[in-house]
């Protein structure tokens, strides 16, 4: 599979959302309403006000690369070029950068600028003949070219013809994404007769389309690699693995890391001067933040579970008492 996929599966990729602006109006676009059509920048869900914010978040997440997405990043070419150059300068030439686009805004000039900046992989979402033209142009440059499309029920023949065409062009990789359901695209999907699956994350029948296509590729003896990415993978594996790396990188001395979650205990209304763990606590107003073992010593305390973001995003709080 593409290098970018391997790093993503390991949680070693940060997501750089460079704009919500896009000229294509795909009915299945899952981009949230607060980003779609807006020229905003986020890295790993963190709003970006300055390029240094991207560097700091990528470093905190111990990422080995970024995936640049949108909207269509090519509509903010200068911004993308600046980010690619900066990331390569800070993290080195082996830092992997891939970019998603429909290709409708791609030109030889824009691709030359991105390749010169250090782009490693271009992922084209084919929505028109112009997208295929962009794939042909990209194959002329020293970047890995990947075509990434959703597996839409009812479009099996289109996907077969697309894979055949890509194979004849010399494309090495095709990624089939399970069609995601989001708050922003649900109505549009339902209007076209598509229904959410039992998980609520994806469209019913999308997985079947992808599996059948992969089987067809194997039976046809095509030399192209076709990879299927389930919608659940992002939430169940990729995102927690990225959080786990960030937790290890940003762990405060009183926190315990448990996968992609950090835990500590908070105690208020007591004087810890005589407690042997006092040197391992932080005082915050009338509360103490401390390792979990402080609750065991005192016999009480509030355990806090949080995502390892900056600042920490609290998920749960519960009282701990000795029985």
Image: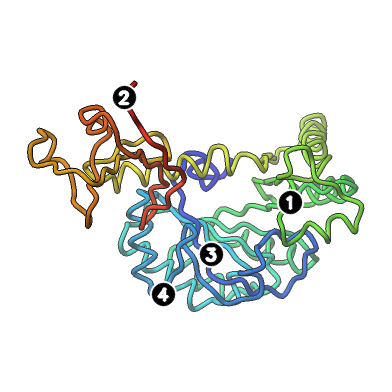
Q: Determine whether, in the image, residue 35 is placed left or right of residue 11.
A: right
Q: How many marks?
A: 4
Residue at image coords 71%, 38%: 223
Instruction: Specify whether 311 is left or right of 29.
Output: left
Under circle 2, the secondary element is loop
Q: Residue at x 36, y 67 (%)?
A: 53
In three-dimensional space, the C-alpha distance between marks 3 and 2, rounded to whole angstroms, equals 46 Å
* Label 4, label 3: how far apart the Cα atoms are: 13 Å
Q: Earlier in the sequence, mark 4 or mark 3?
A: 3
Residue 29: % across, % down: 73, 61
Closest to the observer, 197 or 283: 283
Kindly report the distance in space between the C-alpha atoms of the residues bearing marks 1 and 3.
19 Å
User: Given this view, does label 1 or label 2 mark the residue nearer the observer?
Assistant: 2
Disc 4 + disc 3, Cβ < 8 Å: no
Measured Cα–Cα span from mark 1 to mark 2? 44 Å
Q: Earlier in the sequence, mark 4 or mark 1?
A: 4
Secondary structure at badge 1 equals loop
Q: Which residue is mark 4?
A: 49
Q: Measured from the top left, where is residue 245 in percent x and y?
A: 38, 43
* Residue labelled with disc 1: 181
Return the residue at label 2: 322
Whole-angstrom CA distance, mark 4 to mark 1, is: 29 Å
Query: Which element type, helix, strand or loop, lies under badge 4?
Result: loop
What secondary structure is found at the residue carrying circle 3? strand
Question: In the visual, does 322 lie left or right of 20?
Answer: left
Earlier residue among tags 1 and 3? 3
């Amino acid at each position: 599979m593409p290098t970018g996929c391997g790093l993503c599966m390991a949680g070693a990729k940060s997501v750089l959302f460079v704009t919500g602006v896009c000229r294509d109006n795909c009915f299945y676009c899952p981009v949230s309403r607060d980003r779609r059509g807006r020229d905003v920048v986020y890295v790993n869900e963190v709003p970006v006000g300055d390029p240094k914010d991207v560097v700091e978040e990528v470093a905190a997440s111990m990422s080995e690369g970024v995936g640049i997405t949108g909207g269509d990043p090519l509509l903010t070419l200068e911004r993308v070029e600046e980010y690619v150059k900066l990331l390569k300068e800070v993290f080195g030439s082996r830092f992997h950068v891939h970019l998603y686009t429909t290709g409708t805004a791609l030109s030889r000039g824009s691709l030359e600028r991105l390749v010169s900046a250090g782009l490693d992989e271009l992922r084209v979402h084919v929505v028109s003949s112009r997208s295929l033209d962009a794939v042909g142009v990209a194959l002329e440059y020293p970047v890995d070219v990947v075509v990434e499309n959703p597996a839409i029920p009812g479009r099996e023949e289109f996907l077969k013809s697309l894979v055949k065409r890509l194979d004849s062009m010399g494309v090495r990789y095709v990624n089939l994404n399970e069609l995601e359901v989001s708050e922003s695209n649900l109505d549009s999907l339902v209007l076209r007769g598509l229904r959410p699956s039992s998980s609520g994350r994806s469209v019913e029948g999308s997985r079947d389309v992808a599996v059948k296509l992969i089987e067809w590729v194997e039976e046809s003896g095509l030399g192209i690699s076709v990879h299927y990415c389930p919608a659940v993978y992002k939430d169940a594996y990729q995102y927690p693995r990225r959080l786990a790396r960030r937790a290890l990188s940003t762990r405060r001395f009183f926190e315990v890391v448990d996968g992609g979650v950090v835990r500590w205990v908070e105690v208020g209304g007591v004087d810890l001067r005589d407690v042997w763990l006092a040197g391992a606590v932080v005082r915050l107003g009338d509360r103490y933040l401390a390792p979990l073992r402080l609750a065991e010593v005192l016999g009480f305390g509030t355990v806090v579970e949080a995502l390892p973001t900056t600042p920490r995003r609290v998920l749960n709080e519960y009282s701990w008492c000795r029985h």
